[in-house]
Image (tube, grey):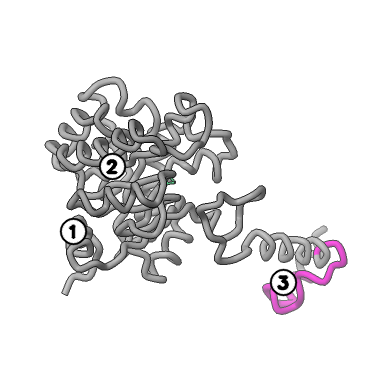
Amino acid sequence: MNNKFNVETFVRYKKENKKISMLTAYDFSTAKIFDEAGVDVLLVGDSLGMVVQGLDSTLEVTINDMIYHCRCVRKGANRAFVVGDMPFLTYQISVEESVRNAGRLIQQGKAQAVKLEGGKNIRDKICAIVDAQIPVMGHIGLTPQSVNVFGGFKVQGKDLVRAEAVLQDAIAVQEAGAFAVVLEGIPEKLSKLISETISIPTIGIGAGRYCDGQVLVMHDLMGMFSGQSPKFSKQYANLGLIMENATQKYIKEVQSSTFPEVKHTFTMDDDIINALKERY
Ligand code: KIV
């Protein structure tokens, strides 16, 4: 039986009340580790702008950056389903550009689906991409590409008008043909209502316990990002500290000539080296 995760598995998991695990990945080696550990979905998030490129937001990430990282991740994914983020300005301008850019993520980046931020406002883009036979994951609530409109990374949908707008976005994304939707930075009661109202799975980040799945940025989960981790995320390891300690040990051993040892070296015949010495 084919046990690879695909768009149909998303629907089945929701029906069977099975939670979906999604994690960001940006390169081959970590994608392979996550895949072998059994994660269902690998998201090549435009968060790479912040955690890989060191930028303040996701706004400068380009389609070529995304294609490059999607290719790396897809190489490491065997069972996991690979979703690639459409970066800022690759789907806001026109329907034609959205389809072309989504197609590039699939054709050149080898992603299996694309993710777009927005609800009612991008319904036509989602419809057109789905019509082009490209699976779409929606992303609503605190959508980081709208950080300047929100005036910062703030929880969305807390009052009646905005809560209803987020709910309508979820319905719009489903009606446009998305197979799943990320709910980011919204109150738990609202994400519960959305998850009960729509039939496609909801994947939460900072959206509480009742979503159909969860996603985290790998650097938050692994403790690889300096600074305070967000309230909604959970750090499962301290790889940052492990890497720093290993680096300090390596530097000391290089400085004290205790690395490399004989076992790390390659040998050759004395005759050859002696012959060479006679020439020089
Ligand atoms: O870019 C990203 O990593 C994301 C997740 C936070 C959902 O969109």
- Disc 1, SS: helix
Q: Quadrant of residue 279?
A: bottom right
For label 2, the residue is 138
Q: Is residue 155 visible?
A: yes
Q: Which of marks 1 and 2 precedes in the sequence? A: 1
Residue in the picture at 31% in, 65% down: 19
Q: Which of marks 2 and 3 precedes in the sequence? A: 2
Residue 260: within the magenta?
yes
* Figure quadrant of the N terminus: bottom left
Could you say where residue 259 lies in the image, as x and y percent from the top left?
Answer: 78, 69
Q: CA distance from mark 3 to mark 2?
A: 65 Å
Residue in the picture at 85% in, 62% down: 255
Left or right of 34 on screen, residue 173: left
Q: Name the amino acid, label 3.
A: Ile
For label 1, the residue is 11
* Figure quadrant of the C terminus: bottom right
All told, the count of numbered labels is 3
- Disc 1 packing (10 Å; few <14; some 14–19; many ≥20): some
Could you say where residue 264 lies in the image, as x and y percent from the top left?
Answer: 69, 74
Q: Which of marks 3 and 1 precedes in the sequence? A: 1
Q: CA distance from mark 2 to mark 1?
A: 14 Å
Left or right of 175 on screen, residue 188: right
Residue in the picture at 37% in, 70% down: 38
Q: Quadrant of residue 156?
A: top left
Q: CA distance from mark 1 to mark 3?
A: 67 Å
Span shown in magenta: 254-274
Residue closer to the observer: 46 or 111: 46
Which disc is residue 272 wearing? 3
- Disc 2, SS: strand
Residue in the picture at 18% in, 58% down: 11
- Mark 2 touching mark 1, by CB under 8 A? no
